[in-house]
C-alpha cells in the first residue's frame, strides 16, 4: 500500500513538472507577443498586463482576501460578494485578479477603488509564489472554475485556505479533468471548500474525488441581481433610440452571430421599420471587423464611439443597426431594450449569462449552446422567458411575434424577472461558508 502511494505521488510530481515545463517553454513566446503588441500601441497590452509575467510596475498593497476571476461574468459574481462583505467589514482589503482585459474593465466598472486589481500570472510556481508574497492574502477565493495547479499548490505550501465559490463543473470539464487526474487530484484535495451552483456541479465534483464534506450546494450567485440602472448607457439610448423605436439588444456576440443577426434584421426592418438592432460584440478586438461587416449590409449603420460625429447617428431617424463598441454598458442597455439575444450560444461557446436580460424583464433568445449556464437557461426556458433560436429565421419569428403583440412580450419578460426573485439566497449561503480573516 505504501509503495503504491509512493508511486502515485511520484507520478503526480512528474505530471506537475511536465505541466510547468510546457508552460515555461511557452513563456518566452508569450512575452515576445506582448512586446510586439505593446510596441504597436495595442491598448490591452499596456504595462499593467506585465502582471501576467509576475512583473509589477505598479505599487502593490497587501490584502486580506485575494479573489480570482477569469473574465466579465466571474467578476460580476465577485462584485456581489465583495460589496456585501465590505458593508459588514468596512476595513476589509481585497485584491481581484483576472486573466482578460474585459475582466479588468469590469473590475474598474463595478468596483472602482474598492479593490486592488492585478492580472493573474501564468501558472508557474515561482510566479504564483511571488504574487502571494506581494499580496499576502489570508484567504483566496476562486470564482466558478479556475483551477490552476501551481496557484493552488503554492497556497497550500503557504497555508492559505482556498475556497471555490459559485463553482460549476460541466460534464465536458469532468471528462477533461479525468484525463489529467494526476495533475488535478492533488489540487482538489488541497481546496478547503467548494460552493457549487447546482446538483449537476455537486455530483461532478464528487466524481473527481473531492470529499463530500468539502462540497456544498449553495446555488448560483448570478441570480442575486438588482433591478437597477446605473445610467452609463443613457447617452447611447438618448442618441439612438428616438421615439417609438423598439430595441433588440444582442449581447456578447461572437462570429458568426453578427451575420445571423444582420440577416434577421434585414427581414425584420422591412416589416417593422421601428426596430433598432444594437450589437455588443464580446471581444473589443473584433469591433472594427464587425463594423466593416455591418456596413456591407446596405442598412444604415452607426457605432457608439463615433456617435457625436457620425452622419448615421439617430439624428438620422433611419438608423437601423448600432454597433456598441465600448465596454461596461451592456448591463444597463438591457434595461432600455425590448428583447435580447444572448451571444456565444449559436456560436457554440457555451452561451453567456442571460440573467442580466431577465432582470430587466425582457424576453430573451439563445442558441442551443448553453452548457456554461445550464441551470439558469433551463429555469428561464421553463418559465417562458428564454426561447431557443438556431438561425436568422428563428430570430425573425420570435421578434415578429413580440413586435406584433406587446402583451406577449411584456409577459415573457416578467417571467424571467420572477425566476430571479424565486432563486435568490445563494449569496448568503456562500457568505456563511467563508471565514473572514481576523483583524
Image (spheres, rainbow, N blue to C red):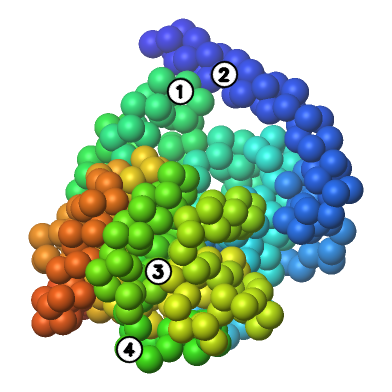
> Is the C-beta separation of discs 2 and 1 under 8 Å?
yes
Q: Position of residue 325 (x, y in %)?
A: 59, 66
Mark 1 lies on residue = 180
Label 3 SS: strand
In the depicted structure, whether residue 96 falls above or below residue 50 = below
Nearer the observer, 251 or 7: 251
- Disc 2 crowd rating (10 Å Cα; few below 14, some 14-19, many 20+) is some
Task: Examine the image and state in which quarter residue 410 appears.
Answer: bottom left
- Disc 1 crowd rating (10 Å Cα; few below 14, some 14-19, many 20+) is few
Of the 4 image quadrants, the one containing the N terminus is top left
Name the N-terminal-most of marks 2 and 1.
2
Name the N-terminal-most of marks 1 and 3.
1
Name the N-terminal-most of marks 4 and 2.
2
Q: Position of residue 331 (x, y in %)?
A: 44, 74
* Residues at marks 4 and 2, CA–CA distance in whole angstroms: 62 Å
Residue at image position (30%, 67%) is 270
Residue at image position (35%, 83%) is 245
Mark 4 lies on residue = 244
Q: Position of residue 124 (x, y in %)?
A: 69, 35
Label 1 SS: loop
Nearer to us: label 1 or label 3: 3
Residue at image position (56%, 71%) is 302
In the depicted structure, whether residue 321 falls above or below residue 185 = below
* Residues at marks 1 and 4, CA–CA distance in whole angstroms: 56 Å
Name the N-terminal-most of marks 2 and 3.
2
Nearer the observer, 27 or 403: 403
Mark 2 lies on residue = 15
The total number of labels drawn is 4
Nearer to us: label 2 or label 1: 1
Name the N-terminal-most of marks 3 and 4.
4
* Residues at marks 2 and 1, CA–CA distance in whole angstroms: 9 Å
Label 2 SS: helix
Amino acid at each position: 500500500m505504501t509503495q503504491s502511494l509512493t508511486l502515485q505521488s511520484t507520478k503526480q510530481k512528474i505530471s506537475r513538472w511536465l505541466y510547468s515545463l510546457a508552460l515555461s517553454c511557452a513563456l518566452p513566446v508569450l512575452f515576445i507577443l506582448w512586446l510586439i503588441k505593446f510596441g504597436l500601441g495595442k491598448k490591452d497590452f499596456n504595462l499593467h498586463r506585465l502582471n501576467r509575467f509576475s512583473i509589477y510596475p505598479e505599487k502593490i498593497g497587501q490584502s486580506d482576501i485575494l479573489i480570482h476571476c477569469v473574465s466579465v461574468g466571474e467578476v460580476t459574481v465577485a462584485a456581489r460578494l465583495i460589496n456585501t462583505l465590505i458593508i459588514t467589514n468596512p476595513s476589509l482589503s481585497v485584491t481581484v485578479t483576472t486573466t482578460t482585459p474585459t475582466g479588468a474593465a469590469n473590475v474598474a466598472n463595478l468596483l472602482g477603488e474598492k479593490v486592488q486589481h492585478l492580472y493573474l500570472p501564468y501558472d508557474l510556481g515561482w510566479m504564483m509564489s511571488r504574487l502571494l508574497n506581494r499580496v499576502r492574502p489570508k484567504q483566496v477565493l476562486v470564482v466558478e472554475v479556475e483551477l490552476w495547479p501551481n496557484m493552488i499548490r503554492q497556497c497550500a505550501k503557504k497555508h492559505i485556505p482556498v475556497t471555490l465559490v459559485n463553482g460549476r463543473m460541466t460534464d465536458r470539464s469532468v471528462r477533461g479533468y479525468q484525463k489529467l487526474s494526476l495533475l488535478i487530484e492533488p489540487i482538489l484535495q488541497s481546496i478547503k471548500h467548494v460552493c457549487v451552483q447546482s446538483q449537476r456541479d455537486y455530483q461532478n465534483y464528487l466524481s473527481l474525488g473531492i470529499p463530500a464534506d468539502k462540497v456544498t450546494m449553495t446555488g448560483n450567485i448570478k441570480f442575486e441581481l438588482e433591478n437597477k440602472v446605473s445610467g452609463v448607457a443613457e447617452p447611447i439610448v438618448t442618441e439612438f433610440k428616438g421615439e417609438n423605436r423598439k430595441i433588440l439588444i444582442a449581447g456578447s456576440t461572437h462570429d458568426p452571430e453578427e451575420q445571423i443577426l444582420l440577416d434577421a434584421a434585414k427581414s425584420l426592418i422591412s416589416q417593422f421599420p421601428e426596430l433598432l438592432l444594437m450589437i455588443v460584440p464580446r471581444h473589443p478586438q473584433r469591433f472594427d471587423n464587425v463594423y466593416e461587416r455591418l456596413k456591407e449590409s446596405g442598412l444604415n449603420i452607426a457605432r457608439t464611439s463615433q456617435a457625436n460625429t457620425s452622419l448615421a447617428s439617430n439624428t438620422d431617424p433611419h438608423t437601423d443597426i448600432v454597433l456598441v463598441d465600448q465596454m461596461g454598458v451592456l448591463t444597463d442597455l438591457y434595461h432600455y431594450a425590448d428583447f435580447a439575444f444572448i451571444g456565444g450560444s449559436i456560436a457554440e461557446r457555451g452561451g453567456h449569462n442571460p440573467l442580466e436580460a431577465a432582470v430587466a424583464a425582457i424576453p430573451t433568445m439563445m442558441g442551443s449552446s448553453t452548457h456554461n449556464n445550464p441551470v439558469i437557461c433551463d429555469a428561464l426556458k421553463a418559465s417562458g422567458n428564454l426561447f431557443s433560436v438556431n438561425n436568422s429565421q428563428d430570430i425573425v419569428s420570435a421578434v415578429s411575434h413580440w413586435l406584433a403583440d406587446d402583451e406577449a412580450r411584456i409577459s415573457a419578460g416578467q417571467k424571467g424577472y420572477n425566476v430571479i426573485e424565486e432563486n435568490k439566497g445563494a449569496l448568503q449561503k456562500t457568505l456563511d461558508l467563508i471565514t473572514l480573516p481576523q483583524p
